[in-house]
Image: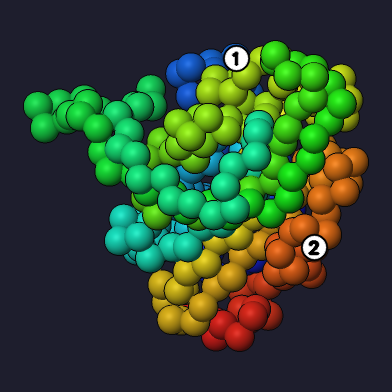
Amino acid sequence: MLPILFRDERLVAIHKPSGLLVHRSEIDRHETRFAVQLLRDQIGRRVYPAHRLDRGTSGVLLFALDKETARLLGACFERQEVAKTYLAVVRGHPPETGRIDHALSRRRDDAEWVGDRSSDEAQPAVSDFRRLATCELPHQVDRYPTSRYALVEVTPHTGRRHQIRRHLKHIAHPIVGDATFGKGRHNRLFQQLFGCHRMLLACARLQLIHPYSGAPLDLIAPPDGEFATVLDALGWRAALPAELRPTIIVETHPESGAAGGFPPA
């Protein structure tokens, strides 16, 4: 069962686990489990993903329950009216705060149409980050006798594909567990020390205005599983912002009305 963070007559949000694809992909033809299919079977309704999370990324994943709501949500994301907060464990000690304003070339997914208007030119991409905690482990991975890591909070202001992963690599602080943009030696160290075999990136919070009620919607999915294990092992749980720590799951059903102050849609 996928953990449901919020549900009313128009929307449903889940806590997507790391390793689960959002939808079917030509690149991963052998996969048989997808968030879209699992959620559809779980609630007995067709669902429409409002955004995407990479396979290795866990956290808040929002769906519409009808095509019109999907259109409205899509417009909200395009207008950058959705605030997204991510947590990541990175190699090295980045500055306490910073902005990464670095254009990214387009990375297409396998289902994207390519036509005359399509372009591979770099697109503007901006991410802000804040360092929450650091550590130095007595293990030599590169040329130094110890290895440094940090917990960071990242707020992307644009929605380019793999934006956070590529931006953190751009500033030489790649995400631990990222097989594409990270470093294998550091990934293996976390496997050996903490039994962590996932990418340490999570969409911990999604904030937007409900497209029908106009009320604020604040969806939170604190890190769990192997991510939480790493945080505990490094003594970082207390460094998390209070609002990103575990909260009560909210779920409503059409027959009982909406939750969190939302009137029935």
- Residue 30 — which label? 1
Q: Residues within 10 Å of mark 2 (few under 14, many from 20)?
A: few
- The reply to whether residue 68 is in sight is no
**At label 2, which amino acid type do we have?**
Pro
In the rendered image, which residue does mark 2 sit on? 246
Q: Amino acid at mark 1?
A: His
Q: Few, some or many C-alpha atoms within 10 Å of disc 1 (few <14, some 14-19, many ≥20)? A: few
Pick whichever, 145 or 110, lies toward us.
145
Q: Nearer the viewer, residue 247 or 87?
A: 87
Give the residue furthest to the front.
Answer: 144
Judged from the image, the secondary structure of the residue bearing numbered disc 1 is loop
Q: Furthest-left residue in view?
A: 116
Q: Position of residue 177 (x, y in %)?
A: 68, 27
Asked whether disc 2 touches disc 1, contact meaning CB atoms under 8 Å apart, the reply is no
Q: Which residue does the image show at 69% across and 46% down from the upper left?
A: 151
Residue 158: image x %, image y %? 37, 50
